[in-house]
Image (cartoon, coloured by chain):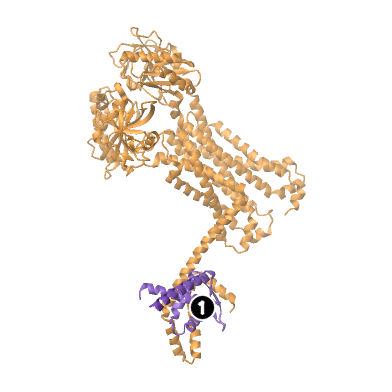
Amino acid sequence: MTRGEGFRRLFRLDRGGADVERAVDDELCFHFGLAVRELMAGGMSEADAQLEAERRFGDVERTRAGLAALDRARVAHVRRAERWSNVGQDLRYALRGLRRRPGFSAAIVLILALGIGANATMFGIVDRLLFRPPAFLPRASEVHRLYLAGRFDGKEFAATSTGYRRFREITDSAASISAAVAFWTTKIAVGVTDPEELRVSFATAGFWKLFDARPAIGRFFSEADDRVPAGTPVAVLSYGFWQARYGARDDVLGAQLRIGRFDYTIIGVAPKGFLGLSDDLPVAFIPLSSGADNSFGVRNPPNRLYHGYTINWLQIVVRRKPELSVAAATAELSRNYQRSYAAQRAEQPGSPPEAEAKPHVVVGSILTQRGPNQGTDTRVAIWLVGVALIVLVIACANVSNLLLARALQRRREIAVRLALGISRRRLLAQLLVESVLLALLGGAAGIALAASGGGLLRATLLPGVTWTNTLGDGRMLLFAAVVTLATGGLTGLAPALHAVRYDVSNALKAGSREGTYQRSRLRSALLVLQSALSVVLLVGAGLFVRSLDHVQALRLGYDPEHLALVTPNLRGVVLDSTSRETLFRELLRAAQALPGVRAAAHTASVPFYSDWEEPLFVSGIDSVSRLGSFVLSSVSPDYFDATGTRIVQGRGITGGDRLGTPGAMVVSQSMAAKLWPGRDPIGQCVRVRADTMPCSYVVGMAEDIRRGSLTDDAGLQYYLAREQFSTSFDYLFVRTSGTAESSGEAIRRGLQRVMPGASYVTVMPMTGILSPVRRSWQLGATMFTLFGALALIVAGVGLYSVISFNVAQRTQELSVRVALGARTHHVMRLVLTDAVGVALLAVALGAGAALLASRWVKPLLFATSPHDAAVYGTVTTVLVAVALVAGLVPALRAARVDPSGALRAD
Amino acid sequence: MNHEELDLLQGTLDLIVLKALIWGPLHGYEVARWVSETTKDDLRVEEGALYTALHRMEGRGWLDAEWGLSENNRKAKFYRLTSDGRRQLRLESARWTRYARAIFRVLRTA
């Protein structure tokens, strides 16, 4: 027996328990053999020697078991250590490899960062909108937002807000819920000097009991503070406002804060991270009863606010009893609503009968975006999650492709290592460690990207939502980590499997000439996949960009770019109607006199901002309200000049329309067509508000305006002379020569001089009011374009790398061709045909996929067919152009091959 | 025998085994023979406990083991001190010397 065998014996020891025990036995046998022999040599009989040896040894069986246990533990430990040292070694090896090719590594990390960053960002957005329950809200699935649903004007709707009386009638006696809260959040002037309009929440006292939150300092308000009609003027600040405005000082408790027209005593601060129940964080919470008539002012005396059905201002949130189902709560609350509706009809006989209005309650999720009124923004955001995933798939395909190319270049190195006896499993692990390491770097960069760029994106595209900081968002980080690991595994698997499948002897024997065809087919497939997916994204981008174009080019019936809305706010000023009228006239004169102002006029309705309706009576029509909702504005002369709304027939409202002359009315084209189809509207008589009122005579017809929806607006509007039909709704429209946005501050300063006392004006460009309305298209167009461009760049890089790699592989073949007389343009065409072929195949596949998917994207588009030929045409051109550019450099290189050099090499 | 004394005994055994290996690799039986020859009758050490100590110290990395051939050409497991084992021996013997000196002083003054 040689020493070498001994070594092998020790190796085998590592394999398992049986070997360990055999080794122990061998050792003990040797010991006893020697002991007995020596004892016998000393003169003992064999039996005595046996006994003596065992006596000296002690308990043989126990020792034997003990030794085996010790050895097993040692072997296991060694094996673990070996595994970790392998991982460590692989990591060092991988790091060395990455450092050796910094450009290649940086490209991969960048591509992965874009893919992972885009996904982390979109996940954060959608999670915030649709999945994450409000902070501090325990058992959020039992907390519901109530929507009062029904039919009006033949259409289903679900109202988010309702009145106080309705809230009480629906929830007071309900047995299926354990708590009901009503609240209202509005922008209102906060502070005495230099007031700012900030969001304040007015809530019933039960609001705090929904949450499992304790005040940061002080206390929350309770039932004792919230008594209808006049509660205690106390306020609970939000944490952020407390920090920003008061530097987180404790002595803020007991201080006074002016909110709207009244002073409030600060009694507490909500905890950090508390957002209430809205998407956007208010600066303060006050008892509903202490603030309601504050903001509405004289227009809505408490008695109308608390006892009528006409003012809809409150959102309702309830906590359902956990043992009862949503269906049971829906049934009970709907019954209550129907009873309440009957009571309303008894008071207001004009409302449609129950059978037609079908009033019922929808018990929805606490998250508004999961409720029946899901915004288009959210639907676009969900689409963008899919888009981000496609970007990630493209990134993965591309990285896989790059790694594959590298594996091909390292073919000989790998073959040598295999020949030297590295196990294939070990090699696979090593290659995977490399791709996971790349993915980890990409993931870290992606999170950094999501934190910076993503934050900016979220703030600009969805400004109405308070976001948590990306790095503090555990759910998003977890998501990013999972995506990162999956990416690492996915991108590494194909190249690694490829690498370990090499036939060692072939790879070592052959030069680079052989054995490439098979592998480049997989690479081409990946390339076609990523190009096809970029076609899908680019088609999406094109469709949204065209929609946005159409939205922006849409004739609204007014000129938003040059239109500013002025809202006077009479805070702390009590005026009788005469001096109020004097002030408003003065404001108008001041506005008209401002430089850069082309026209100004009073109005009572503002598109997408504030509507006003009154019952209408027209002879020959039973019920005008059944024909639709007609929005009215009472306006001063010059109104149509101010808004830019065209008069298509007759005249507008003029200075001649005053008290004592017959009532004048201008109607929209659609309204005229609805009320007097086929007849001349001029001279028709309409009675406004009651059928006993004197006639208003139609003097002109104006073009329709969009005021409630860009996509389908019935366009039913009419205008009365402010002198003849006065109102307490008072806004000013100012038409500017420059953009309204740039002139806003000058207008505010000019008009503020006219305002008495603590009253003030706010100026809003009309585009600011329209931007949330246009946002979903803006969001879709921006993000699809961004992601589409990313995808295109990544696909272009992929195309370039694959083609140039193929050219390098084909150097010999090309040299032979050149040597045989092929001309430069022949060789270039050969290479470019490849590139264009891939592009065309990708266009065919991608366009097919896009056509299939377009069915679902159609509702999000505006006046754009999902099969828009121009979009598909442009995308095809762009992709082919990118393919040509990507192929050009390698093609030129191919054309310059030196036949003698290339043939001699290798 | 309470727990502390057992620990003490175990520590001593390790020390003796480490010391036995200081002149080069030995197999288990040689360690046992060296121990009984060196300690004469003053210290009785069970050979089973010696093996346990050998295997335990192998697990701790103080000893290395490999299979080789004994002087009469039979396959035997040889133990050798590792550098960790040498350091351990130095530490332990210094500790024991100090300990013994202290006890000795105590006994002399008594």
Q: Looking at the figure, which quarter contains the N terminus of chain B? A: bottom left
**Residue A605 location, quadrant:** top left
**Residue A679 location, quadrant:** top left
The colour with which the image depicts chain B is purple
Residue at mark 1: chain: B
Q: Looking at the figure, which quarter contains the C terminus of chain B? A: bottom left
Residues packed near mark 1 inside 10 Å, few (<14), some (14 to 19) or many (20 plus): many
Closest to the observer, A864 or A504: A504
Closest to the observer, A242 or A251: A251
Residue at (55% x, 50% y) in the render: A438
The colour with which the image depicts chain A is orange
**Which residue is labeled 1 in the image?**
B20
Left or right: where B51 falls relative to A147: right
Closest to the observer, A640 or A84: A84
Q: Secondary structure at mark 1?
A: helix
**In x, y percent, where is residue A872?**
56, 34
**Residue A475 location, quadrant:** top left
**In x, y percent, where is residue A255?**
32, 32
Residue at (45% x, 42% y) in the render: A470
**Residue A619 in view here:** no
**In x, y percent, where is residue A196?**
39, 27
